[in-house]
Image: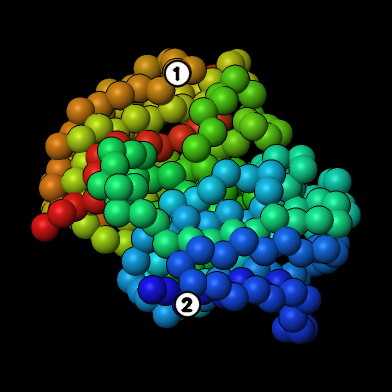
Amino acid sequence: MANLSIAVLNGRGESQCRGEGKNELVMVWQGRYRPGDRLVFTTDEVPGFYVIRVDGAMEEAYVYLTRERVEYTVPFDPENPLNAERISYHPGSFTGERHYIAMRKARAQENGNYRNLAKNVMDQYEDAGCYPHAHANVATSGPIAPLFAARNAVDGLLASAVHYPWPYTSWGIDRREDAEITVEFGRPVDMEELRLTTRADFPHDSWWVRGTVSFSDGTSEVVELGKKAEPQPFLMRKKGITWLKVGQLIKADDPSPFPALTQIEVFGRNSQR
């Protein structure tokens, strides 16, 4: 039985609220988030699968933890409506004075389910020992950078017709021809299908016509892409991979310099071997 705890810490590391439980824990914090606040989730059973909800306005995250302590930084100043990171989250996230936070061990049935192995609604820029985790060699730069971070491509949102705000979230490449994005699973998984949703805010956006998907087992596959708003599926059966990378992206012959990736989905199961 896992010993769990959740704490809300301010920017000075002082505890605002703390809860403890066995295997499943729900905590309600009364207060307003400030810049620098963070949520700390701890368990004495790692590695393992957990279900975490960082906010009542966000979905549960099915994640694989490799560290006993995982810190989740409140990703924006809730009092600043112009904060660029805020625009990529549900408008109600982390706002107000009452917050629902939860953590539990995943059930055995959940761990055997067919699912989108890339999805992690609580993914952050830094690798926090919480998987899946997306990172890229490039993202759109400047003040609007958080709008087009790699985590947006694994947040589960498929709306692609506009380039922002929420729920139109995407990974942007800052016009780089060598752009590539990696999804790390943190453990071996058995993959059956890849789905890529490219952003489709035409004519603002361009699109890619081809890309290469590389895997941790040393193999790679070329995918042909089209000018589409819906997910583009590719059957790819891989056993025991721990990461994949999408790169070598070829832009269409189109005036717009802005191709972008709305979502990467990897369907399959946790490897049983």
Q: In the image, which disc is placed on residue 230? A: 1
The kind of residue on which mark 1 rests is Glu
**Quick one: SS at disc 2?**
strand
Q: In the image, which disc is placed on residue 3? A: 2
| In the depicted structure, whether residue 37 falls above or below residue 218 | below
**Quick one: SS at disc 1?**
loop
Q: Is residue 226 visible?
A: yes
The kind of residue on which mark 2 rests is Asn
Q: Is residue 27 left or right of residue 12?
A: left
Q: In the image, which disc is placed on residue 30? A: none
Task: Characterize the local packing of mark 2: few (<14), some (14-19) or many (20 or more) Cα atoms within 10 angstroms.
Answer: some
Q: Nearer the viewer, residue 185 or 270?
A: 270
Q: Position of residue 112 (x, y in %)?
A: 25, 47
- Which is more foreground, mark 1 or mark 2? 2
Q: Earlier in the sequence, mark 1 or mark 2?
A: 2
Image quarter (top left, top right, bottom left or bottom right) of the C terminus: bottom left
Q: Is residue 20 left or right of residue 259?
A: right
Q: Is residue 124 visible?
A: no
Image quarter (top left, top right, bottom left or bottom right) of the N terminus: bottom left
**Image quarter for residue 9?**
bottom right
Which residue is found at the position 84% from the left and 46% from the top?
A: 82
| In the depicted structure, whether residue 124 falls above or below residue 163 | below
| In the depicted structure, whether residue 268 falls above or below residue 37 | above
Which residue is found at the position 75% from the left and 56% from the top?
A: 99
